Image (tube, grey):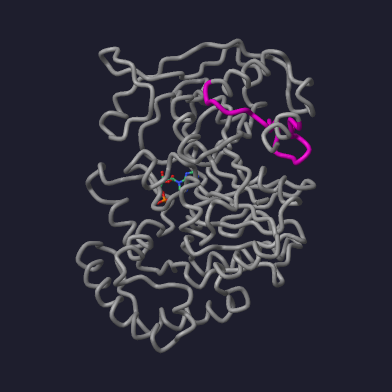
Amino acid sequence: MASTCVVGLQWGDEAKGKIVDLLCDQHDAVVRYQGGANAGHTVVANGVTYKLSLIPTGVLRPDTEGVIGNGVVIHPPALLKEIETLSSQGVEMGDRLHVSNRAHVILPYHMAEERLTEESASKADHLGTTRRGIGPCYRDKVGRVHGVRVGDLFHPERFREHLSRIIPYKNRLLTAMLNDYVPLDVDAVAEEYLGYAERLRPYVRDTTTWLHDAVGQGKRLLFEGAQGSLLDIDHGSYPYVTSSNSSAAGIAAGSGIPTRHIQRWIGVLKAYTTRVGGGPFPTELENEIGERIRTVGREFGTVTGRPRRCGWFDAVAARYSTQVSGSTEVALMLLDVLSGLPELQVAVRYEDENGRKIETLPAHLADFERCRPVYETLPGWSEDLTKARSWSDLPQAARDYVNFLAEQIGVPVSIVSVGPERTQTIVRDDVVRSLLK
Ligand code: IMP
């Protein structure tokens, strides 16, 4: 039982990659269990910036293995490109990457299908997705008739036959609904994807069996969530969510490993809140404070480059996602970004337009849209935190802020991050020890 999960507790981009990277040397393999190339992890190590999307962050360490589990949706050219880019930066996959033959495959018509809704005349249909074909691919997965799995690419005749039923159907639909759609050719798509399959062949296997063997051998696994718990298809701010279980709820389904093997449950939170894409965001700051957080925190999407919406810390949302993801400790990220703000606000509850108290995240969009944050104001600090290396290096006001958030969420903050480098991290060993007793 020495496995760990690291999941985001907000709307993604909580800097989970840095925490995963830090914990890698205590684990043997890092496992992705949901999402696809909509995720973006930026890890800075020894002055080099690595951008990962599908490949688990763990592979940056030469001895750590990376697993892309069955719950992930894979766009083969995106995966191959990532393997090549890492190789050009000196990170070789060798036999350390394991890709599930049960994972579903993103095909070109998925991108076109996503354009249908994202560019439709009805603004209400726009979710502000990353346009990586994620939603349409998951839709085909659960619809079963048109799903294509990685394993299908290794049965060429059946794959061609399957595509010869799928593509004419999609062509008819998309030609009727998208003005600029160029119908796809079955043979061309089949050849393209069979070509990708050959290049991916060394990595593809039954990762469920591989993971169970690893557990049997006493290997320590690190489950790396993509996106954040508030974007979970079931538990997030539906319909402004992603199409997978991006909270810790997705681990068992997306990897085949029961969660009883997990001992450490780390939730990752920013010291403020951000969101990309549409959907309610009660603590959003559409003013110069939000602008300042965006600039200082470099809050622009890793995948799409979109400016992220920025706001105060939302303790109502964080409390809820901590419960859903079962986090027993929190890594608090980007605390340094708040330096210099005279006062900090934290939403401790919501209320509706009639002043009625709302203590938890409403399930329905209409109710969530009506929520107004009720803030507690805390003093800020002016000191630069980026050189702090221990809890006592932090100014009192910063420690008070962290303690206030922990009290609000109901679990301790065990890690505080004050910059992107591995060294810019305060690990509170006393807190970790008391949790693991
Ligand atoms: P999709 O995952 O591309 O379908 O997008 C659905 C929603 O999730 C949109 O609001 C995206 O901006 C958001 N989203 C998807 N991936 C990420 C991520 O890695 N970080 C933050 N938001 C994300």
Residue drawn at point x = 34 percent, y = 57 percent: 114
Q: Is residue 130 left or right of residue 142?
A: right
Picture layout, residue 155 above or below residue 397: below
For this rendering, which residue is in front, 333 or 208? 208
Examine the structure image and report whether residue 416 is included in the region drawn in magenta. Answer: yes
Position of residue 326 measured from the top left corner of the image (x, y, whole percent) = 51, 39
For this rendering, which residue is in front, 216 or 30? 216
Which portion, as a residue range, is magenta? Answer: 408-429
For this rendering, which residue is in front, 297 or 216? 216
Position of residue 104 measured from the top left corner of the image (x, y, whole percent) = 44, 67
Residue drawn at point x = 33 percent, y = 60 percent: 139
Position of residue 421 measured from the top left corner of the image (x, y, whole percent) = 74, 40
Residue lying at the far bottom of the rendered structure: 157
Number of disc labels? 0
Q: Is residue 23 left or right of residue 226?
A: right
For this rendering, which residue is in front, 94 or 340? 94
Examine the structure image and report whether residue 383 is included in the region drawn in magenta. Answer: no
Toward which corner of the image does residue 148 lie, by quadrant? bottom left
Residue lying at the far front of the rendered structure: 437
Toward which corner of the image does residue 363 lie, by quadrant? top left
Picture layout, residue 249 above or below residue 138: above
Toward which corner of the image does residue 435 lie, by quadrant? top right
Picture layout, residue 354 above or below residue 203: above
Residue drawn at point x = 77 percent, y = 61 percent: 62
Residue drawn at point x = 56 percent, y = 65 percent: 79
